[in-house]
Each structure stands twice: as structure tokens, then as C-alpha cells.
Image: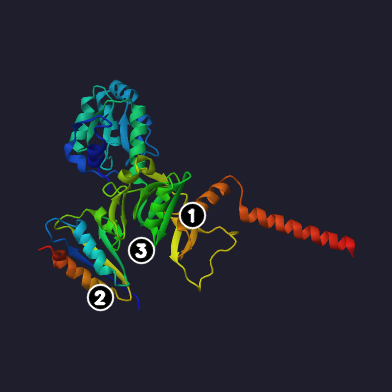
Amino acid sequence: MAVKLSCKVKVKNALGLHTRPAAVIVKMLQPLKSSVYFTYKNETINARSIMSILMLAARKNSQIVITTEGEDAELAMKVMVRAFDEQFGEK
Amino acid sequence: MYLVQDLYEQHGKYLSLELIAGRQGLSRRIQKPEVHRPGLSLTGFFKNFVHARLLIFGRNEIDFVRQLDEKTRFQRLQRILTSSTPAVIVTNLRIPKELIETCEKKSIPLFRGKATATSLLSRITFLLIEEFSPSVTLHGTLVELFGVGVLIQGESSVGKSEAALGLIERGHRLISDDVVKVKKKEGCLIGSGPELTRHLMEIRGIGIINVAHLYGAVCVRPDKEIDLVIKLEEWDDQHFYDRVGLDDKFIDILDVSTPYHILPVKPGRDVVLLVETIALNHRLKGMGYNSAKEFNAKLLETIAQKRGKKKIGS
């Protein structure tokens, strides 16, 4: 069953959403089936696209709304929230 | 939401604006992309007067205000300048003190501009229309082939970027990869890339490349009207793909109906060549020739002739 979830997260790593975190996000989403979107400053983008994530140029402490939709939406959301929390392994 | 401050900060230099009074009102909202010269309203005719418009006082307006007696001058200005007036711009003239006082009292930003009223009017209208035009960010790759703007869409990893790279290699142009900002201007869709990732592409297995540096300035451009949309799709045996092309399909983007093609992808199908062919065929249609329809007309004619012969023969 397709579920749609959304959740607000904060960018915690010092350098913001730069190329390495973007690559981590895309890699984490690869095995998942749901559609995942990030909304930042009225701009909604596909989180599976590195270029789109980079375009946001989100700095530390910016608020991003994650939306997941699809059969494994809950898992996708869990994975994303954890990734933001763990600062994409950049602590 | 667009504020007077935004207009002042972004375009103040271009319009050579100088803030004279009403600094507290810089946070006023510009509600309409309209600029007005209040000529007639200054004479006391207020019917159909729209308060939410930005006002420009040119030589005519200022001269007229000057020759009014002091009381009327105040009255008329009070009536024209209200809480919804975003800002007032006066051309390069001496500004009557009543105007400055009223603006200061009501916190309406008052600017002096160097250009003539007509020039300011057209330039500001153009800027505001641009700012107020509806826009959307789409996932896809925008390229220009033979002068036709083609937006290639499809799921992640279906091969949009690879197709675009192939097209660039053949001498076509990239506008933006992956993220396309679309604005509706006078019924047309104008696509451009975000400033930061402009002319960059991400190719799986290679990484991020800068196309403008790799292939030169000739293979990129900043923006382009979107003439058609091609959706790349994994080949699905269950789906019946268009085999004749008699019916045109359309997709709505910002309420603009745009020609739409679904292009199934599978090994052995040269996507680059197919996209080129769709673009060329689109040009041909634009010139008034529709291959499928022309052929069908010819076929119908041939059938009709055969029927005629049969009748004569029988």
C-alpha cells in the first residue's frame, strides 16, 4: 500500500548539504522503492538526484521537509531522518 | 511574496533609484505587477483607481501637483497614497515637500529615479511581470536540438543525462541537467538551470562533469523555451506504444499544453537518434507537414480511387 509521509529535519553537519552528503543520500535511497522529495525554501526536489540536492545549497541549521511516498515510505523516512541525525557520517 | 525592499536591493542600481523618504515602509508588499502614472487621479477623478499599484510621478504629474493650491495638493495626495500603495517613484525632478511629507508620515517608500517616466514604467513593469510569473521546478533535463527546446523527463537512472551527453556530443546544447526551473512568460514556458549547478551533469560511473568546460561554450545556453516534452521509460511489454503517430499527445505544465512523447528505452534503441528524430519531426510539423497525417490522407485517396475503379469495372 502506498503511504505518504512527511517530516521536518535540520541539517546538522558543519558544511551543510555539500557533495559528499548528497552522494550518501542518493546511495542510501538506491535500494528503496519510494519516491523521496526534499522541500527547502519553497523548492521541492527529487532526493534521488545529486544535482537537485546540490542546487538547494542548504547550509548548517537549515530546515528541510522530507516527503516519502510509496510502499516502503516508512523505511525510507527512517533512513533519511537517521542520515540527517548522524550528519551523513561526517561528525 | 515580493517586497519593495527586494525590488530596491535587486534592481535599485539598474533603475538608479535613490531612497528619499519612507524607509520604514520598505517591507511593504508589492501585490500586483502593475505600475501606474496617476495623472488623471491627481485631477480628482478617482473612479477605478487601483491602490495596490506602484506609482510613478513624471514631469507632468509633478507640474500638475505644483500648480494646485496647498490644501487641494495635500487632499489629493492623501487620497492617492494609501496603506496599500507599495511605493512611489519620482523621476529626476525636485520633489514637492507635500509628497515627501505624506510619504514619510504614511511610511510609503519614496524614490527618485534617474530615467524618464516612460522608461521607468516599462522597465519596472518588465521586472515585476518576470517576478510575478508562475514558476515550477521540474525533474528533467533540458536540451536544445535544431532550435527546438526538448525537456527529457523520466525516472532516476533511466538515462536522461546519458541521452543529453550524447546529444551534446552531436553538437546540440544543454540548458540544464536534472533540475529545470520553468517560468511561464506570455503563454510560453521558459526553462533554465539553477545558477549553482548550471551546465553541470552527473553521470553514473564518472561523477560530476562541467559540460561547458569539456565541450566549450558552443554546447550550452542559459535558457530556452520548452517546445516539447519527452518521457523516457523502461520498455514495458504490456504497454502499447504509439506506432503511427496520428494522434498528438499533450502534457500540461503551468497550464500550458505542451506536445508530449513517451519514448520506451531498451538496449539497442539509440535514444539520442530517437530524440533527434522527434525534435526534427516537431519542426516539420511546425512547418505544416505531418508525416503520419499526410501518409494517411494519401492512403485514403488510394483506397477511394480503387473503389471508384471497381465500380466502373463491375
Q: Residue at x 30, y 76 (%)?
A: A72
Q: CA distance from mark 2 to mark 1?
A: 40 Å
Q: CA distance from mark 2 to mark 3?
A: 21 Å
Query: Is residue B123 placed above or below B230 in the rendered structure?
Result: above
| Image-based side of B25 in relation to B32, left or right | left
- Residue A75 is marked as 2
Q: Amino acid at mark 1?
A: Leu
Q: Residue at x 37, y 28 (%)?
A: B118
Q: Amino acid at mark 2?
A: Leu
Marks 3 and 1, the one that precedes in the sequence: 3
Label total for image: 3
Q: Quadrant of the N terminus of chain A?
A: bottom left
| Image-based side of B27 in relation to B123, left or right | left
Chain letter belonging to callout 1: B
Q: Secondary structure at mark 2?
A: helix
Q: Position of residue B191 (x, y in %)?
A: 38, 48
- Residue B157 is marked as 3
Residue B50 visible at all: no
| Image-based side of B286 in relation to B148, left or right | right
